[in-house]
Amino acid sequence: IVHATINGMAIEAEENETILHAARRYGIYIPTLCELDDIDHTPGTCRVCLVEFQLPGAASPKLATSCNTPVVEGMTVQTRSPRARESQRLQVELLLADHDQDCATCVRHGNCELQDVAQFVGLRENRFYDPKFIEEREIDDSSPAMIRDMTKCIRCQRCIAICRDGQGVDALVQVGIGQDKAVGLKYGLSQKESTCVTCGQCVLVCPTGALGERDETDKVLEMIYDPEIVTVFQFAPAVRVAFGEEFGLPPGANVQGQIITALKRIGADIVLDTNFAADLVIMEESAELLKRLGAGKRPTFTSCCPAWINFAEIHYPQILPYLSSTKSPMQSMGVICKTYLPEKMGIDPKKIRTIAIMPCTAKKDEASRKQLELEGMAEIDVVLTTRELARLLRREGINLAKLEPSGFDNPYASEFSGAGAIFGTTGGVMEAAVRTMYYVANGTEYDRIEFEQLRGFEGVRSATVDMGGKIGVVKVAMCHGLKPARAIVEQVLAGQADFDFIEIMACPGGCVDGGGNLRSKKAYMPNALKRRATLYNVDRAQKVRQSHNNEQIQALYRDFLEKPYSDKAHHLLHTMYND
Ligand code: HC0
Ligand code: SF4
């Protein structure tokens, strides 16, 4: 323990604890931009955290960056002295010298860490800006999912760190020197050609508007206002428990009903639930899995997470034969919206546009896949991230927090079981699948519904589940985050893993912390567990908790798909991957 003062307050710090860290513990704010404690990232590149300190016996105070200067016995620190303030302000002014100035048109406007810090230091002019500085910077819009705008990069390197150390993808590098320094994809490739899997975790940590999704809110507005078009919206399991935070509601609040009201207000013709399609996917995936197990094919990987699919295709094509062929719930819903639904409702499928609200950037990639077209029509026409939906509602003057909830009213594709609801968190797909697989294999319900052994939060979890009679014990694994996914894929390829079924979600936490969700300033995944807890409560509160007992699913098979894994179901709800 060492003793010091910060702004006259006596403090105690751990040996080697930085001034920034100690100050934060005592509630003293020091502006920073590059540092992100949650991912242990302290590159010291922004230099905004300058403070003045003096050591005992020293003649005069010195300036230092507080993020990498340790507290020393007897040190006096000033974070608000005139010199500290001026230095902090100068650093922010320098960061803005080669930063796009057009804040009002930036998607991050009003939610930008650079704007916050500029306000904190009281910046009122920008003496050094010269447009020449950013003329040569890259704006990469090659990916259907993401835009990388280096005119807004402040070189904090958080994205490089999360991609390399968090996700283990390591697609990003620092490029350029001096004034031209920014972030690029490795080997000078564009986002689309690169090894990036568009998981969007880098977007979640970017402090500015340098990284973001491709904004498609205008496209959706055009569809809504086209009188010829019938818009069919769906929203993902995780969206309802993460979206409220965009409008100041507590983390984990379930705003399913308010989202339905909001979508109707902006002019949605039909609102459906991706949870319904999650139930449908369970029907197909369990039938497929039982078939594969019967044929001695092990393991089978889940296939609903598009960043995981990208990862498998780009990084481990050898693993593709082990992937379930079942389409994701989002795409399955797209298919239902352009086949069964129009048949039932008497609408021309060509007039339907499907819009999916997802907590995910990679879902935009998925929707653009060639093999996910249905007789020349896209199964999903537009994907909006949760962030874009918030933007769209603000553009329409709607405050979600003030809306009364309403219910789904479509009799064909909006009911869901508790099993469908838990898809949005790591382990949920597995738990949902076990509930139904047991029933399919044995003709009776499992005597348990909740499987605690599938519910931990470690990167990789494994368990054995006794499926009774015909199948016996199955070994399952659940994995969230791509770094653990890489480890398990390598084990499987080396013949060192003994699993029947493996669930992979590319984002840590699963979709509840998907890369399309609200960005938390100065934090990474702060609310994952609260969002997850609500999903489990949704499951618990449902009368029907197994996908096969969802009556709308039963009707869909009876009236249209025949049975799980029938020829028709196979044609419509299964896909292939690019090797
Ligand atoms: Fe997910 Fe999904 S659960 S990927 O995490 O499977 O995005 O929430 O919509 O499609 O259902 C995301 C969330 C989904 C899909 C579902 C799956
Ligand atoms: Fe890396 Fe994911 Fe960002 Fe791509 S989207 S650069 S894989 S963190």
Image (cartoon, rainbow, N blue to C red):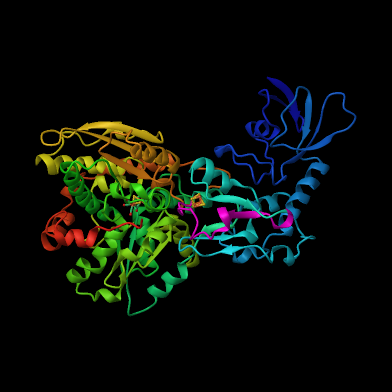
Residue 494 drawn in magenta: no
Residue range in magenta is: 178-200
Residue 197 in the image, given as x and y percentages of width and height: 45, 53
Residue 193 drawn in magenta: yes
The one of 502 and 412 positioned closer to us in this rendering: 502
Residue 403 in the image, given as x and y percentages of width and height: 40, 58
Identify the residue at image location x=73%, y=56%: 179
Q: How many marks?
A: 0
Query: On the rendered structure, is 19 left or right of 158?
Result: right
Q: Name above or below for residue 306 compared with residue 67.
A: below
Answer whether residue 111 is visible to the viewer in this image. Answer: no
Residue 446 in the image, given as x and y percentages of width and height: 16, 36
Answer whether residue 449 is visible to the viewer in this image. Answer: yes
Identify the residue at image location x=36%, y=36%: 491
The one of 316 and 35 positioned closer to us in this rendering: 316
In the picture, the quarter occupied by the C terminus is bottom left
Residue 234 in the image, given as x and y percentages of width and height: 33, 60
Q: Name above or below for residue 200 compared with residue 412.
A: above
Q: Residue furthest top?
A: 1
The one of 224 and 244 positioned closer to us in this rendering: 224
Query: On the rendered structure, is 278 left or right of 295?
Result: right
In the picture, the quarter occupied by the N terminus is top right
Q: Residue furthest bottom?
A: 228
